[in-house]
Amino acid sequence: DAGVIQSPRHEVTEMGQEVTLRCKPISGHNSLFWYRQTMMRGLELLIYFNNNVPIDDSGMPEDRFSAKMPNASFSTLKIQPSEPRDSAVYFCASSLAGGGETQYFGPGTRLLVL
Amino acid sequence: EDQVTQSPEALRLQEGESSSLNCSYTVSGLRGLFWYRQDPGKGPEFLFTLYSAGEEKEKERLKATLTKKESFLHITAPKPEDSATYLCAVLRGSNYQLIWGAGTKLIIKP
């Protein structure tokens, strides 16, 4: 059974460019989470979707960040324009039923903004 | 303030040398405590969920326990492949959001 799939695995871009990260959750899971991980701040929740609807985006750093989930099998996290301080590893996780269930993580996208 | 603290930050052991990792928490209305393992360059991998004080769960050389204030991850006779960062996270009240600890980096030397 396929786990959470993320693409790209690595992204190097220049400041000011648009970056789009993609996630395919585990089939049948209806909760999806986007996280950012850095050495300084650890894992931070950016946004949480339940049944494709954004429930809480209070962790999104600023208006440069946006996320969508057009259907149950696909989500995107977009950064426009990107800045060097956005450099981090971005993880997508999914869970079955409500947010209290175990979250399963993808392999992450390592983003470097020059 | 809800908080999860893991100790030590790093732990170096010889192969076969048993030890424990600690995760202490201060949250209201604990719903569950989760342990994950993270290898370099990979996403966190789920290990255990504990729901109530006194509960224990085991998997191979790992055993997780839970009290009202903390959880321990006991590692018995570890092998080099057990080297990883171990993360603890807590789910509280009616919230969906996990509160994460900073992790313990475990290094097992052959």
Image (tube, helix red, strand yellow):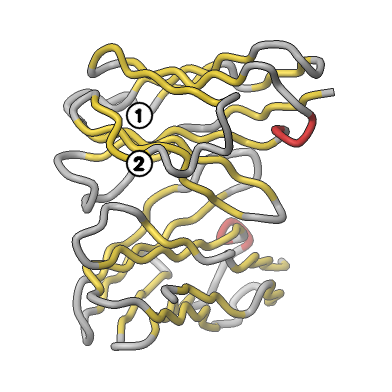
User: Which residue occupies 52% across, 49% down?
Assistant: A44
User: Which x, y percent locates residue A114?
Assistant: 85, 23
Q: Chain of mark 1?
A: A
Where residue A103 sits, quadrant-wise, is top left
User: Which residue occupies 32% across, 62% down?
Assistant: B48
Of the two numbered discs 2 and 1 on the same chain, state the one appearing first in sequence: 1
Q: CA distance from mark 2 to mark 1?
A: 8 Å
Q: Left of A75 or right of it: where is B31?
A: left
Please state, as top left, top right, bottom left or bottom right, where the C terminus of chain B lies in the image. Answer: bottom right
* The one of B52 and A21 positioned closer to us in this rendering: A21
Disc 2: which residue: A104
User: Which residue occupies 29% across, 88% down?
Assistant: B68
* The one of B18 and A111 positioned closer to us in this rendering: A111
Q: Is residue A77 above or below residue B61?
A: above
User: Which x, y percent locates residue B58?
Assistant: 30, 70
User: Which x, y percent locates residue A94?
Assistant: 31, 35
Q: Is residue B81 above or below residue A113?
A: below
Q: Chain of mark 2?
A: A
The label number, if any, that marks residue A3 in the structure image: 1
| Secondary-structure class at tag 2 | strand
Q: Left of A17 or right of it: where is A33?
A: left
The residue type indicated by label 2 comes to Tyr
Task: Please identify, in this view, whether the residue under mark 2 or under mark 1 is nearer the observer.
Answer: 2
**Which residue is outermost to the front?**
A63
